[in-house]
Amino acid sequence: MSKQPTIPVNVFCSCAQEDEHFLVQLEKHLGVLLQSRLIVTRHRHKVSAGRDWQYELDHALDTVPLILLLISHNFISSEDQYKGELPRAMKRFHN
């Protein structure tokens, strides 16, 4: 009996720039899932050089099945996250 390949779940992670170290820690905790290709994380710090980072973020926010918000005082005080990514994530949740 052969095992069917699984399609990884795309997870968009949003955090304030000052909290990137928490994102690094989170990815360590998710290591088994990442290495097994059960999930793939996407976030602004992972956009490849030369790519349109805004397009990549917009596309991820509009299409991924799971959005993870790392909310902190830095997140709340960041206009990009609080007025940009948070409302878009909430809109997806309510639709």
Image (spheres, grey):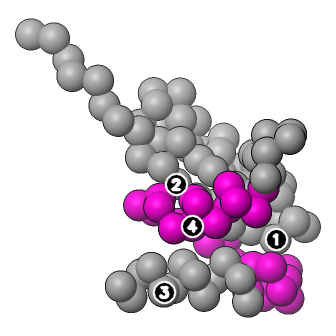
Instruction: Name the residue beneath numbered marker 2.
Output: 11
The residues colored magenta run 53-82
Disc 2 versus disc 3: nearer the observer? 3
Instruction: Name the residue beneath numbered marker 1.
Output: 16
The answer to whether residue 28 is above or below residue 37 is: below
Please say if the residues under marks 4 and 2 sit with CB atoms less than 8 Å apart.
no
How much space separates mark 1 and mark 4, taking CA atoms? Answer: 16 Å
Q: Of the residues shown, which amino acid type is indicated by label 4?
A: Leu
Dot placed on the residue nearer the N-terminal end, 2 or 1: 2
How much space separates mark 2 and mark 1, taking CA atoms? Answer: 17 Å
Q: Of the residues shown, which amino acid type is indicated by label 3?
A: Lys
Q: Mark 3: give few (<14), some (14-19) or many (20+) Cα within 10 Å.
A: few
Q: Residue at x 63, y 83 (%)?
A: 86
Q: Position of residue 30 (x, y in %)?
A: 56, 43
Q: Of the residues shown, which amino acid type is indicated by label 1?
A: Ala
* Left or right: 78 in relation to 86: right
Instruction: Name the residue beneath numbered marker 4.
Output: 61
Q: Of the residues shown, which amino acid type is indicated by label 2?
A: Val
